[in-house]
Amino acid sequence: MRRRPGLSVRLKLTLSYAAFLAVAGALLLAVVWVYLLRYVPDNPQGLLGISPNRYLLIHTFAPPAAIAMAALLVFGLVGGWLLAGRMLAPLTQITEAARRAGSGSLAHRIRMEGRQDEFRELSDTFDAMLGQLESHVAEQQRFAANASHELRTPLAISRTLLDVARKDPARNGDALIDRLHEVNTRAIDLTEALLLLSRGERGSFTRQSVDLSLLAEEAAETLLPLAEGRRITLDVTGTAAGTSGSAELLLRMVTNLVQNAVVHNLPTGGSVTVRTGTHDGTSVLRVENTGRRLPPELVPTLTEPFQRGAERVRTDEHPGAGLGLAIVHSIVRAHAGTLDLDARPAGGLLVTVRLPGTGPGAGG
């Protein structure tokens, strides 16, 4: 935004300090006049011819007073300029840091020393903002690199298959078509997941009343064949848990959690429990599954994009793209909720989603 040139803050403060001193000096002279000179006799001879009169005092006092006023003005200008420069020095540091950040350098920090005051508070806040911004940019760059890598893989496979088919026309076409269809489906699923993740991050959706218990039942019904094929018990219990948000996104959230719990489970004989309810004005969804024990340091990374959790058990049927819990986390944040992941001592994971509740059951 282009602005017209104006006076600097330092000059404005300097003029303010000088004007303040000049006004203070003028008020002092006015007090002297009102409370002293007005009571001095104003006759040519003074009092009994020996006391000074008002005329004499004014002509004697006026020149030194004028000199003092001029000295006050000069002192106000010089002292104000120096004082303003000293007081605004921290602001200069913050401005320089903001200018460097605007040019793309997010690693710089002010780290202003000294005791706490308004400038130090602003400096600390700015440093914290730079840290979050740098972390966000790095995360976006890492996400873009991972997404490019993931999308390049099916495209590279497709090109390889097509090159092989072109060099060997006698090759079985049906097998090639099936393989290309499989690779293309994976690329489409990955693209849709990326778009869904982006949509959740933006929070661009129409809100409506949603019951998490109904979504849990729908997700369980959809994934029941997958659970039965792995001989995993899928149990949905609980009460109504109303919230406000996108039914489509919240259904994807629940589906991802349940599918994640089924896929990352014991090879056979495991269980998945889905519970819904309300507590202290929030709607709660808990998805708990059996499985191998998870290292504590692994759990916080599971919501990062393309983090597949190398220590978790899964099969080649659902390799995924590592976006399941990342999408869940994005949807939960877009709905002003919280997502907690806890490793079960016996193995497996407990995922707890808390969303703002609505309806009579919200206060239960």
Image: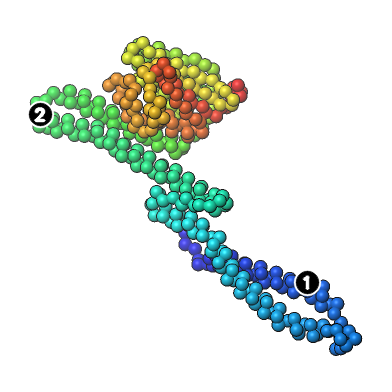
Q: Is residue 193 visible?
A: no
Q: Position of residue 294 (x, y in %)?
A: 38, 22
Quarter that holds the C terminus: top right
Near-viewer residue (121 or 247) = 121
Task: Specify the amino acid type for callout 1.
Answer: Val
How many marks on residues?
A: 2
Near-viewer residue (280 or 82) = 82
Q: Residue at x 53, y 52 (%)?
A: 114
Near-viewer residue (320 or 61) = 61
Q: Position of residue 309 (x, y in %)?
A: 34, 26
Q: CA distance from mark 2 to mark 1?
A: 110 Å
Please give the label number shown on residue 31: 1
Q: Position of residue 183 (x, y in %)?
A: 24, 28
Q: Is residue 341 visible?
A: yes
* Element class at badge 2: loop
* Element class at badge 1: helix
Please give the label number shown on residue 169: 2
Please give the label number shown on residue 213: none
Task: Specify the amino acid type for callout 2.
Answer: Pro
